[in-house]
Amino acid sequence: MAELRKDYFTDRFSIVNKERILDLPIYEEEEDDGKDCPLCVGKEDTLPPAEFVLSSSHGSIIKTSDSIERVKEWKVRMIPNPRSLVSLDVTQTYSESPLYSEPAYGYDYILIASPDHKEKFHKMSLEQWTYVLISLQDRIKSLLSKKKVIYVMASITQGKRAGVIYSHPYCRIVTLPRLPLKIEEEAKTVQTYKSETGSCIMCDVIKSELGGPRHILSTDHFVALTPWAPTHDFEFWIFPSKHETDFQRITQREISDCVKIIRACLGALAKILKFPSFNMVIHTSPEKKITKKIDWHVEIYPTLRAWGSLEKGMGIYEIQVSPEVAAEKLRQYAKREFADLTFE
Ligand SMILES: [Zn+2]
Ligand SMILES: [Zn+2]
C-alpha cells in the first residue's frame, strides 16, 4: 500500500510505500589517495589565497587569512571557488520573457573542510565539525551584507552519487541574486499561516512531530526528524526546537549542540548504508526581505538511487523506505552515536 503525501510547507507530493521495506543498496565508495587532489595540504600555493583560515592554538580557534605567504597549519580554509558558477564580473544584460534572463551575479566559495583528504563527514570529530559550521555561519553572515546578494546557499556534498566535484571533504557557499523557489514557497506558507492563526507553522509541525513515528532525536536545542513527504529515502531534517529564523545568528552554544545532532544522525546513516552519499543544505531566512522569514533548518538528502521518471518528469517523489521506517532505524543508531560522541 502506498499513499500520496503532501509536503508540510509546499505543494510538492511524494508517493510513499508504506509496506515494503526494500533491501537497501549498500555502496562502498572507492578511496583515492589524494595524490592529485588540488585541495590537499601542500597545495595551498596553487589555489587562490584563502579569505580566511581557521587553525587551533592551545585549544582556542585562531582566524587568519592568507597573504602572499600561505598559512600552512590549518583546520579549514575558505577559498574563492576556482570553478565559480556565478561571478561579480557579469555583463548587465537582461532579456524579456519567454527568453527571460538576468545576470548570474554573485560569490562562490569552497570551504576545505579538513586537512585530511580521507576524512568523512559521518566520522568527523565534533571539533572539526565545529570549525565547519562556524565557517559557514561566518561566511553566510558576511555575504548577506553584500550588495545584490539576496540568498546564500551553504551546502555539503559527500560521495560520487551525490555529485561531489572534489574527493576531498568540502562545503560550498554560493550566493544568489534572487530568492530560490523552495525558500520562497516555505516563506509564503509561513506568512499565510501566521496571518491566519497567529503562530508559526514550522514550530507547530515540529511540536506535533515530537515523540511521534518520524522523530529521530532531540538535543538541548535541536530536533531531528524524517519529514512526512520526503524527496529521498532516509531524508532527514534538523530544526531548532524553539522558533529561530536565522542560522547566521545562532550562538556558539547552539553551534556546539547542532554539530552533535548532525554528526550523530550522519553516523547513524553510515551504520545503515555503510557509505552515505548525501547532500546537506541549510535553509535560512533572507536578511533583506523581512516578510520572507522561515525557521532556519538543515535538510539532508541521502542518495540511494538516481531520480527516475516520476521525479524528473512529474516532480513527484517515489519513496521506497517510508519516513517512519527510516526514522525507526535512524533512531536506534543515532541515540547510540550521540551517547558515544558526548561521553566524557
Ligand atoms: Zn585532498
Ligand atoms: Zn517557528
Image (tube, grey):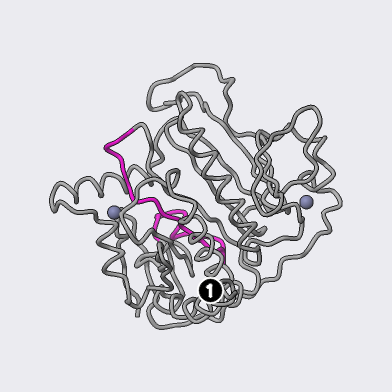
Q: Position of residue 7 (x, y in %)?
A: 32, 60
Whether 243 is drawn above or below 262: the answer is above
Q: On the rendered image, what quadrant is the C terminus found in?
A: bottom right
Q: Position of residue 154 (x, y in %)?
A: 53, 45
Q: Position of residue 62 (x, y in %)?
A: 66, 43
Q: Position of residue 227 (x, y in %)?
A: 38, 66
Whether 195 is drawn above or below 332: the answer is above
- In the image: residue 78, left or right of residue 3: right
- In the image: residue 34, left or right of residue 54: right
Q: In the picture, residue 179 is in which quadrant?
A: top left
Q: In the picture, residue 121 is in which quadrant?
A: bottom right
- In the image: residue 193, left or right of residue 119: left
> How many dots with numbers?
1
Residue placed farthest to the left in the image?
A: 196
- Is residue 51 or residue 301 the one in the foreground? 51
Label 1 Cα crowd, 10 Å radius (few <14 / some 14-19 / many 20+): many
Residue placed farthest to the front in the image?
A: 58
Residue at image location 53% in from the left, 73% down from the top: 338
Q: Which residue is mark 1?
A: 338
Magenta region: 289-316
Residue type highlighted by circle 1: Phe
Residue at image location 56% in from the left, 81% down from the top: 23
Residue 312 within the segment the image draws in magenta: yes
Whether 196 is drawn above or below 16: the answer is above
- Is residue 53 or residue 148 the one in the foreground? 53
